[in-house]
Image (cartoon, helix red, strand yellow):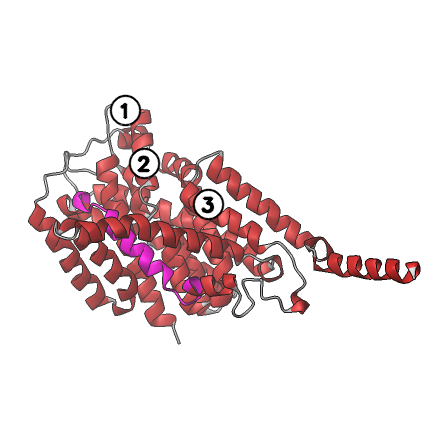
Amino acid sequence: METGFFTFLADNLKEFLSYTAFAHITWGHAIMMLVSFFFLWLGIAKKFEPMLLVPIGFGILVGNIPFNEAKGLMLGIYEDNSVLNILYSGVRQGWYPPLIFLGIGAMTDFSALISNPKLVLVGAAAQMGIFGAYIIALLFGFEPNQAGATAIIGGADGPTAIFLSSKLAPDLMGAIAIAAYSYMALVPVIQPPIMRALTNKKERLIRMKPPRAVSETEKILFPIIGLLLTTLLVPSGLPLLGMLFLGNILKESGVTRRLAETARGPLIDTITILLGLTVGASTQATQFLTPTSILIFFLGALSFVIATASGVLFVKFFNIFLKEGNKINPLIGNSGVSAVPDSARISQHLGLEYDKTNHLLMHAMGPNVAGVIGSAVAAGILLGFLYS
């Protein structure tokens, strides 16, 4: 009787242990947990994009707690009808990014761009990172749709990267999203050395004219005109650009303050939490740790370098045609990538490093917000050409 009882207990204990994560953990899960700790360290200790990296880092941890998939408990993000899978549908089907863009539009002031429209060219030049990386990805053997989805990392815009990859290369979306947000967070590390290497002391000391005052009428007309100019040219960018400009007119119209506050507050915060958690959880080791993922990280870094260099070099080239007093400080060329407002802050910090009275932030915000529009337009172009 006692022998049967102890056998019963041993069998139950064995079955219990088969349910634990310890019975299913692999080196891949352990590696991804270390990546999770790194993301959390960057977000919490270093304060690099904490609003993104903390939920993403924790999501990586959630997604890499192993379990017995054969039991059909519907726990994992890739199991149909699991809670995580349902939440992940906002990423997979691409409806989180437009809601993020709605919030971005409601918190963005386009005055710097309106007051100096030629700065839109700087934002456009930085998108060369996307198209340069697209060509390089093709040379590495990526299919055109995969190359386009990977190249968008160069825009330094996580929501745009998620939106485009969900349409063009859903199987690569986890790696693309993590790479995009990683490089957005590492803007303060990646960009300054490139900016210093490509400029000389005289160029860094260029002073720009103060931006002119922008009227309320101009601010209201900008999202309307901006929507028409961009989406009539690139209709496939409508989901992102439409929501961006809607959010902005809610902000600037002066009659929809509650809606604007909701868009830039509770709505974008909620979507950011869900997007960060599920993007992080999508890095499940069995799906994520592949040679292709590693190559995507390399191409993402390359596209980011190309984008930063293109913006700085374009300003240097553009200055050849500008009169003295109207020249642009090339230290704002980096801000053409759409990491708002981090890349503009880097322009400011480097400008003050060489001249403590030369404030570049307001000037840098022009190409910075132009970069947001530019990356969405670039995504629309790639989507229009490559989607099938």
Which of the marked residues, 2 or 3, is nearer the chain's N terminus? 3
In the drawing, does residue 20 fall left or right of residue 5? left
Give the crowd class for mark 2: few <14, some 14-19, many >=20 residues within 10 Å. Answer: many
Q: Nearer the viewer, mark 2 or mark 3?
A: 3
Query: What is the x, y in percent for residue 181?
Result: 44, 49
Amino acid found under the numbered disc labelled 3: Leu
- Residue 355: mark in rendering: 1
Please say if the residues under marks 2 and 3 sit with CB atoms less than 8 Å apart: no
Q: What residue does disc 2 label?
A: 345
Give the crowd class for mark 3: few <14, some 14-19, many >=20 residues within 10 Å. Answer: many
Q: CA distance from mark 1 to mark 3?
A: 33 Å
Query: What is the x, y in percent for residue 150?
Result: 45, 60
Q: Nearer the viewer, mark 1 or mark 3?
A: 3
Amino acid found under the numbered disc labelled 2: Arg
Residue at 22 percent of width and 65 percent of height: 231
Query: What is the x, y in percent for residue 190?
Result: 43, 40
Residue at 20 percent of width and 50 percent of height: 258
| SS of the residue under disc 3 | helix
Q: What residue does disc 3 label?
A: 53
Name the main secondary structure of what is drawn in magenta. Answer: helix
| SS of the residue under disc 2 | helix
Task: Work out which residue is located at the far bottom of the displayed protein and give it.
Answer: 388
Question: In the rendered image, which quarter is residue 348 located in?
Answer: top left
Query: What is the x, y in percent for residue 222?
Result: 14, 54
Write down the region rendered in magenta. 90-112
Residue 103 visible in this rendered orientation of the protein = yes
Which quadrant would the N terminus be assigned to in this image? bottom right
Amino acid found under the numbered disc labelled 1: Asp
Q: Nearer the viewer, mark 1 or mark 2?
A: 2
Q: CA distance from mark 2 to mark 3?
A: 19 Å
